[in-house]
Amino acid sequence: MSMLVKPQETLDILRRHQFSVQKKYGQNFLIDAHVLDKILDAADIQADDFVLEIGPGIGTMTQGLCRRAREVVAIEIDKELIPILKETLSAYDNVSVINADVLKTDLRGLISEKNAGKPVKVVANLPYYITTPIIMNLLEEQLPLHSITIMVQKEVAERMQIGPGTKEYGALSLAVQYYAKPEIVANVPANCFTPRPKVGSAVIRLTLHDKPPVDAKDASHMFRLIRASFNQRRKTLVNGLYNAPDLHYDKEQIAEVLKDMGLSEDVRGETLTLEQFAGLSNRLLTLNKTYDTLK
Ligand code: SAM
């Protein structure tokens, strides 16, 4: 078991390196052995796996990953943590630490260089201030990923799993469910971290689909519709799409398509399923084609 996960060990190493915790980087270090094992088990790391860790912190989870996986690459933004990681990971020769912002890292290049472009497993206790951009980036880039097992704020985990007709349902739910199967694995209270976060946390595993569950002819067009309808949640879908600067449909066209789908023209985006968004997108695209050929 990782010794680092013991609260006293974590505090000692931080003190010895005179490290001050950076709130701006969302630093909450895991100090609960049981939760650590839960994450590692949920990630289902096999001896031949290549694992990408985002935000290793002082290396608590990284040590466990190094023991289970063939190779680990960990991306950490805070340069003050690099000497600490050098120390805590010195016993392992299957890990490399990259001092960089994960949102500015060429992950496709990294996976192709280090794992010959084959699917990797992502494991992370994510910094909460950029959870959504990190997840959206991993999914929308369509990187070769097998699964993403992450600790996130509890509400965000719930948003990823939820379906239509609730106020938590939104663009994140639809993106996650289009690309992956989400499963909440554990709820984690604030006292499992130092410093304690102000919110409850949860571990969620996203297993990437081999093939999306719905047939969207142009996924990026479908996600433009989704974003437009949730950007203006209180408006009807017709108005939300009509007002979107990156879409060019008139109200009658949208209403006609909705009618064709058996939906009311007053419907709100938040009531549509992923399948209905795909249907809406495919039908609107056909309109565009007809329009283009007429021009
Ligand atoms: N994995 C450690 C653990 O479980 O104890 C630390 C988790 S802490 C919640 C989040 C980590 O992500 C911190 O080490 C923080 O410095 C790092 N981080 C924050 N923003 C980042 C970014 N944009 N790119 C890479 N790492 C980042």
Image (cartoon, rainbow, N blue to C red):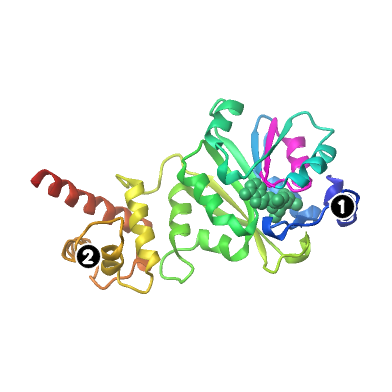
* Residue 234 in the figure: left or right of residue 11: left
Q: Which residue is depicted at the point 54% across and 56% down?
A: 132
At mark 2, the secondary structure is loop
User: In terms of sequence position, does the residue under pointer 2 or pointer 1 come before the other?
Assistant: 1
Q: Which residue is depicted at the point 57% across and 39% down?
A: 105
Report if residue 38 is visible in the image.
Answer: no
At mark 1, the secondary structure is loop
Q: Is residue 271 magenta?
A: no
Q: Which residues are magenta?
A: 54-77
Residue 228: x and y in percent read: 35, 61
Say what amino acid the circle numbered 2 marks: Gly
Q: Residues within 10 Å of mark 1 (few under 14, many from 20)?
A: few
List the residue tagged with mark 1.
18
Figure quadrant of residue 240: bottom left
Q: Residues within 10 Å of mark 2 (few under 14, many from 20)?
A: few
* Residue 141 in the figure: left or right of residue 81: left
* Residue 31 in the figure: left or right of residue 129: right
Quarter holding the N terminus is top right
Q: CA distance from mark 2 to mark 1?
A: 64 Å
Q: Nearer the viewer, residue 129 or 50?
A: 129
Q: Nearer the viewer, residue 247 or 261?
A: 247
> Does the beta carbon of the residue at mark 1 sit less than 8 Å from ligand 1?
no
Say what amino acid the circle numbered 1 marks: Gln
List the residue tagged with mark 2.
262
Residue 84: x and y in percent read: 82, 43
Residue 140: x and y in percent read: 45, 46
> Is disc 2 in contact with disc 1, using a CB cutoff of under 8 Å?
no
Residue 14: x and y in percent read: 85, 52
Q: Is residue 64 magenta?
A: yes
Q: Nearer the viewer, residue 279 or 236?
A: 236
